[in-house]
Amino acid sequence: MEKELAKHICKKLIGRGANDVVISLVNLDAKQIKFVNNGIVKTGTEYLKSLNVFANIKNRLVSTTLKDFSEKSADQLVRNILDFAKNIHEKKDYYGIAKGPFKYNKVNDLYDKNYDNADLVDLTERGINASLENAKRASGIMEASNANIYLYTSGNVEVEQEGTHFYFSIRSFYDKESSGHKTISGRTLKNFNTEKTGKESGLIAKDAKNPAEGNPGKFDVILDPLASAPLFDAVGSSASIFNVEAGTSFFTNKLNKKIASNKFTLYDDPTINDGLNSTFFDAEGFPTRKNTIIKNGVFRTYLHNTSTAKKYKTKTTGNAGLVSPEPTNIVIENGKISREKLIREVKSGLLITNVWYTRFTNYATGDFSTIPRDGIFVIKNGSIEGPIKNIRISDNMLRILLNIKDKANDIQQIRSWEAEIPVITPSILVKNVNITRPVL
């Protein structure tokens, strides 16, 4: 019924003069558990259904959503789209969607058959109890979802994918000034170890007790995966050709130029196993692939959909975004040494386990600031000396990329409220990071 309705809308729009139509039907089962001060305070389940319609009528682009799944509502939606298109400006540099049919390579580990029977309460309590081996209280969230996406387009595409997602975030507290934060996420429960996550969070909180005031200056800094993810989230977004055109990318005019350390390679990889945004087709049904954005410090490609690729006389990277090409999973090439050995490389520096309020004062140049939170530790002669507080990173992303000195082999998938695009990254050592004091 629902799929037939999608086909009905597409046929109606094409019959009334639409050039391109893309319809995605999404069925989502979502579960959530919130816990505060060691106890579960809320559990909930949502069932969401939407039929999303994108239409190109003579290069006038309209995007809308159908909530009432009836043929009468669908016909009214078609009329609304056509009426709305008459009143918007033509997008003269729009060049259409992908034309299929296509052959797809499946991506592994996207669906966990045990989703319905997963004991999320037990997984949550295991994480809390592990945290309390060192911390005094813990708060956070557990999320799980099962999404089915059906895509139907006027470009001869009909494809469907089902996938599960799991996410656990725990912030542990030892006292008023010491805390630790860790997350774990994935598409299956195979390596979803909430106990390990909770224990690591609690240990950071305990080690961060009695912090001293931090000092401003230039320091070699090790960024844990949770701390570096918001920065590389911005790197992935800046690779979108849409952001380049909008003036909100620090990669404008950087194609084939050296913009990072020789030791730094970054991919966008929608085909990676267990990747939170992994998919074998993009938003217009084009087969996805791994794209190398930065290779040994050299910027290799912008991210394109079919339309922007035609505009720039290149090939789509499989990153639609029907209007704005976008990254899927940002992957930093893993390091070759342990995190402990990475710490031993630092004579005078800092270990930062988490950041928040990452803000760009100038997207075009890459100027930004972010506030380290939770455990921040001084490193002297390769050893962790003790915790500090009240510092800010005020620097430039292009300078950060050029100053990457080394990486550990502790790669981890991170999703957070400051890194909506999943980032798969190890701990990273950056030299001469500018540390200031926050404005209180």
Image: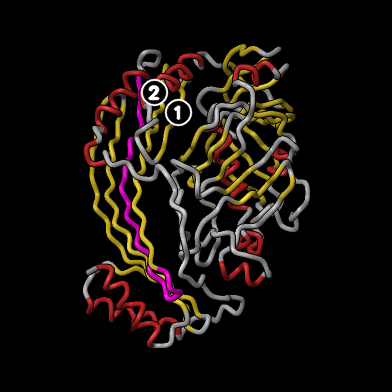
State the residue lying farthest toward the bottom.
16
Instruction: Identify the residue position indicated by label 2 in the image.
Output: 198
Mark 2, other Cα within 10 Å: few <14 / some 14–19 / many ≥20: many
Amino acid type of the residue that numbered disc 1 sits on in the rendered structure = Lys
Contact between marks 2 and 1 (CB within 8 A): the answer is yes
The residue lying toward the viewer, choosing from 408 and 242, is 408
Q: Main secondary structure of the magenta part?
A: strand
Percent x, y of residue 239: 63, 54
Q: Is residue 256 magenta?
A: no
The residue lying toward the viewer, choosing from 69 and 399, is 69
Q: Image height check: is 18 above or below 344?
A: below
User: Residue 232's mark?
Assistant: none
Identify the mark nearer the N-term, 2 or 1.
1
The residue lying toward the viewer, choosing from 206 and 47, is 47
Q: Which residues are drawn in magenta?
A: 137-157
Amino acid type of the residue that numbered disc 2 sits on in the rendered structure = Gly
Instruction: Identify the residue position indicated by label 1 in the image.
Output: 182
Q: Is residue 144 magenta?
A: yes
Percent x, y of residue 35: 30, 31
What kind of element bears circle 2?
Answer: helix
What kind of element bears circle 1?
Answer: strand
Q: Residue at x 38, y 63 (%)?
A: 159
